[in-house]
């Protein structure tokens, strides 16, 4: 089942997702007139930043809620509902951009193959996603409280993701895996994060039990992750630039 996103809450409470993604737009370095696809555009903030550089950009996202919010935010930009593993484009594009999305695609090769098809030869794929060890402390606390759960994310190493890209016909030009401690504001920041992003982990668990788990996880993490009224989560990010051969 596709997750129903709270798009308004996402852009108000978790704006760090697209604010940190501005550096990925810089890595993309969009040029006037380039045709660019924003894969997993969310509420459209980074799509708009790419458009502001003069590129001809379209955004796609699997979530109808996110696309509705993106269209409301930026009505002049082309936003469409589409899945990362099955999308098509009318004609090949110069670049595909993706921020904070591809770790949700567990069959990574399916998305990578679609991106390859969407790009013209020499076109570039510029992405950031969760990398190996992302939220390790947080997920460790969840497992201590709730036991082993099936995680909805794929957090690869540089070698793992590069191998998938190369197998699909890409040449990896740049790849880095780095720590990026990420602040989630407010006393309820961790609880909000678990509700927004962690819901799939708790499938089949009652709402009351989910709440108990979130409280227990917060108690475990508070000594190391809560400072000055905010939570800091142990994010690790993978950034890659690859070119379609």
Image: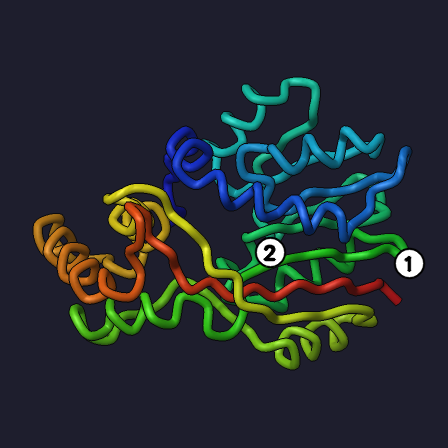
Of labels 2 and 1, earlier in sequence is 2
Residue at 28% from the left image edge and 56% from the top image edge: 226
Mark number, residue 121: 1
Please tell me how crowded label 1 is: few (under 14), some (14-19), or many (20+) other residues with Cα within 10 Å: some
Q: How many marks?
A: 2
Q: Nearer the viewer, residue 93 or 25?
A: 25
Figure quadrant of residue 50: top right
Q: Name the residue tied to disc 2.
A: 85
92 versus 130 height, above or below = above
Q: Residue at x 13, y 51 (%)?
A: 211
Label 2 secondary element = loop
Camera-near label (2 vs 1) is 1
Q: Quadrant of the C terminus?
A: bottom right
Q: CA distance from mark 2 to mark 1?
A: 20 Å
In the picture, measured across the screen, residue 3 lies left or right of residue 241, that is: left
**Residue 150 % position (x, y):** 32, 69
């Amino acid at each position: 089942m596709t997750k129903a996103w709270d798009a308004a809450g996402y852009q108000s409470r978790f704006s760090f997702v697209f604010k940190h993604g501005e550096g990925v737009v810089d890595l993309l370095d969009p040029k006037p007139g380039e045709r660019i696809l924003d894969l997993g555009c969310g509420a459209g903030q980074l799509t708009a930043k790419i458009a502001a550089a003069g590129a001809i950009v379209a955004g796609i996202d699997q979530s109808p809620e996110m696309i509705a919010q993106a269209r409301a935010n930026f009505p002049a930009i082309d936003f469409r509902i589409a899945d990362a593993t099955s999308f098509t484009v009318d004609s090949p594009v110069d670049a595909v951009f993706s921020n904070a999305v591809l770790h949700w695609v567990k069959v990574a090769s399916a998305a990578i193959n679609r991106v390859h098809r969407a790009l013209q030869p020499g076109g570039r794929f510029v992405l950031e996603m969760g990398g190996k060890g992302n939220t390790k402390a947080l997920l460790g606390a969840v497992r201590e409280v709730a036991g082993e759960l099936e995680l909805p994310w794929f957090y690869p190493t540089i070698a793992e993701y590069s191998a998938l890209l190369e197998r699909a016909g890409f040449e990896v030009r740049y790849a880095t895996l780095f720590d990026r401690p990420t602040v989630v504001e407010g006393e309820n920041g961790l609880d909000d994060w678990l509700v927004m992003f962690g819901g799939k982990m708790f499938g089949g668990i009652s709402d009351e039990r989910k709440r108990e788990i979130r409280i227990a996880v917060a108690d475990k993490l508070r000594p190391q992750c809560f400072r000055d009224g905010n939570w800091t989560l142990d994010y690790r990010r993978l950034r890659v630039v690859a070119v379609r051969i």
